[in-house]
Image (cartoon, rainbow, N blue to C red):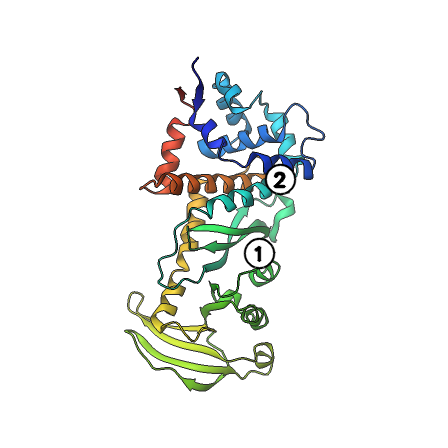
Amino acid sequence: MQIVYTIFSEILKLCPRYQFERAVERYQGDRYMKTFGTWQQYITILYSQITLKDSLRDIETGLSSHSTRWYHLGLTGVHRSTLSDANTKRDYRIFEDTFYHLLARCRDLTPKHKFRFKNPLYTIDSTTIDLCLSVFPWAKFRKTKGAIKMHCLYDHSGAMPCFLTVTDGKRNDVRAAKETSHPLSPDSIVSVDKAYIDYKWLYSLAEQGVWFVTRAKSNIDYAVTGQHQVTGKGVLSDERISLSGIKTKTLYPKDLRLIRYYDEERQKILTFLTNNFKLATRTIAQIYKSRWQIELFFKWIKQNLKIKSFLGTSKNAVLTQIWIAMCYYLLLTYIKYQTKYGYSLLQLSRVIRKCFLKERFL
């Protein structure tokens, strides 16, 4: 007897089906839709991510042309009106939970970051996704512009997002960071840009045993309390300081480390602020420079996943599509690390797109 399978059916086996069904039960995903279940919706949106489909009609037509393979995928049928209703009404948190279960699987396989120290290294940042205000009125950003923000805690071990939250475009970055439900473990190192300088929040990180690295603002008010030995190429000064502003010295009462470093590549003097007094000055500069990896991550998902044009206009539909897109990113990451694939994620996604519904026989 021949067993038929496809690359797509093998990818679906990597999804944590038990946890998925538990999430469906928790959020009553199948309560009002008996003919088009949550798993079928997940398969359909995942298909649109892999093939970069732009519309519900495209998805319906594309899947209809492969109807002989539906059985092996667990799909019984797809109609654009049913899919539209599911995207609008079925709770997006089902797919958010699925993302975090996939993440737990991936983290067992990821390589360590490139630095010699063993501390976990993270970056916090956000990216804005522009929306048409007349089509997405719930996403008001400015008077004539709509947008949402994706806030990310990026893990440099494995180049993965280990925490995501999507807010309206007006949400302040520091406020979103404060509201995160993903606490950093003690002895972690997190890099942030100047937009995240809130001394009360930074002090809360220090109290948790978390090290931070950021750029100091030009108007920082401080007093020098000590000196570190200046070592390493490009290091101009390395000082121990205390904040002396009327409010800042209350918000952050402990000492900080202020480093002035000349970046030859940019031909610019950079001033770093950190609560870590042990790492070498050059390492501090390299930690902040590595923050650029999260910008490359944002660029990649915007260019290679369908998170800029959406299949529905409701907030639930948009969030559903974003979370399933991020699930696909983790599936690609899992396959890359599990198989020790030597090429980029982009190359892997192209290979999968080319042959993911071709039949194989056992």
Vertical arrangement, residue 360 with respect to residue 158, above or below: above
Q: Quadrant of the C terminus?
A: top left
Q: Is residue 205 left or right of residue 90?
A: left
Q: Amino acid at mark 2?
A: Ile
- Furthest-front residue in this view: 1
Q: Residue 238 appears at what percent x and percent y? A: 38, 79
Q: Mark 1 falls on what kind of element?
A: loop
Q: Residue 290 appears at what percent x and percent y? A: 38, 60
Q: Look at mark 1 in the image and give the residue it sits on.
A: 182
Q: Nearer the viewer, residue 262 or 169?
A: 262
Q: Is residue 299 visible?
A: yes
Q: Is residue 191 visible?
A: no
Q: CA distance from mark 1 to mark 2?
A: 18 Å
Q: Mark 2 falls on what kind of element?
A: helix
Vertical arrangement, residue 32 with respect to residue 327, above or below: above
Q: Amino acid at mark 1?
A: His
Mark 1 Cα-neighbour bin, 10 Å: few <14, some 14–19, many ≥20: few
Quarter where residue 246 is shown? bottom right
Q: Look at mark 2 in the image and give the residue it sits on.
A: 94
Going 52% across and 48% down the picture, which residue do you hit? 129
Q: Quadrant of the N terminus?
A: top left
Question: Mark 1 vs mark 2: which is more N-terminal?
Answer: 2
In the rendering, which numbered label is found on residue 19?
A: none
Mark 2 Cα-neighbour bin, 10 Å: few <14, some 14–19, many ≥20: many
Vertical arrangement, residue 137 with respect to residue 356, above or below: below
Going 65% across and 46% down the picture, which residue do you hit? 138
How many numbered callouts?
2
Going 41% across and 81% down the picture, which residue do you hit? 239
